[in-house]
Amino acid sequence: MTRWAWSATLALLIFTMGTSIVTPLLPLYQTRFSLSDGQITLLFAAYTLTVVPTMLVMGGISDRIGRKRVMLPAMVSVTLASVVLAFAENVPMLFAGRVLQGLAIGSFLGVGTAFIVDHARPREKAWSAMVAGLAFRLGFGLGPGLAGIIAQNSNEPIRRPFEGHVLLMVIAFLAFAVTPETVRRLPRDRSSGRWRPQVGVPAGQMAGFATFLAPAAFVLGFLDATLLSVVPLYMVAVLGVRNLILIGLVGFLELGLGGVTPLLARNMPPRIAVMIGVGGGAVASLLVVSASQLHSVAFVLIAAAAIGLLNGLTLQGATAICGVSVPITERGKLVSALYMCAYAGTIPTIALGYLAQGIGITPALGIFSVAAILLAICVIVVGGRVYREVVPYVETPVPATDHRA
């Protein structure tokens, strides 16, 4: 990869840390602000309601006006979100911080991934897409991992983790500033007198996306969100955990190990990676439910590590497919649509949280595992048949200009 691809990767890594800091702090929020399990999952998923529409639109916009014009406001937004959450004194401030994070991640994540791929050499496009997935998964994992350590050893456990992220964002801004733009701004649509952003999945990609990539990303998001929102409450209420480092460790293992997967399975065909990742991750969710029967925190940690590695495999395959199957002018749109589906998978956790209030958190997690397994079967059986192969897009060479008289 080029040095510009690495500098963009550093900015992405630090950026993503900010949105997952809340995971080990959820039990503190529940106690401090008297929130129910349902309200906690609603808080966790609140930014998804902003992420999904923002990501769907901004990927296409970045393909037309340039990556950096979209990414800079996103970086400002995630920094402001950390400031708001650091000084939150009431529930509306918590939700305001999450909405700001949603605007930020929706604008940045898919575009930032495309930005890294844009800067890679032609023969390294697929690898750079996997590195981008590694960076954002590792960033998401470092967020709760470091936040749990800081919160456990601080007299201001809610404030200090976010203050640390604000300081790190200074480095992210510097890395972003020195990285050049990759997409030249296109003219407005003169036929209508106004510019129209491109939204959705590129032509020719819908069948494979709708039956294979989209539901696989949805399962990935569902597994992620449940481990990061419901499981921390489960650890406190059912397993009696009071150490925030352990709760943060679940987030680090589940998200951070997903960033290691591309290094372990670099040569695996991306289509096979998606099927193994989504199927294995869904089955591994049963370990979380088993932890309540054995009253074992170790089972939760093992489940988090297994799901993290397998979700990383799903993401590795899906982003590699998006990175090689479309031209540069549609890459941001497709990658953003993929991440949009992953974030849509966090929405069912709201119902899961309220279900836990009614039937108990352990039965609710059992229903979660069954649902994840059924969705994974659909991806493998139905999507695997529809999307049988990955066809790389071949850039058409620009003919040389003849300067002879």
Image (cartoon, rainbow, N blue to C red):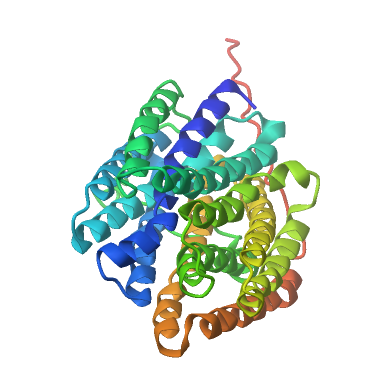
Q: Is residue 315 left or right of residue 93?
A: right
Give the x, y percent position of residue 313: 69, 54
Quarter occupied by residue 362: bottom right
Q: Quadrant of residue 53?
A: bottom left
The image shows a total of numbered marks equal to 0
The residue lying at 44 percent from left, 82 percent from top is 356
Compared to residue 144, the image places residue 204 above or below, namely below
Is 189 situated left or right of 8 in this image? Answer: left
Residue at 79 percent across and 52 percent down: it is 269
Please tell me which residue lies in front, 129 or 279. 279
Which of the 4 image quadrants contains residue 43? bottom left
Residue at the location (67% across, 71% down)? 287
Image coordinates of residue 254 in percent, x first then y, are: 59, 56
Query: Would residue 369 be found to the left or right of residue 346 on screen?
Result: right
Toward the viewer: 168 or 363? 363
Q: Position of residue 129 (x, y in %)?
A: 62, 42
Q: Is residue 34 above or below residue 302?
A: below
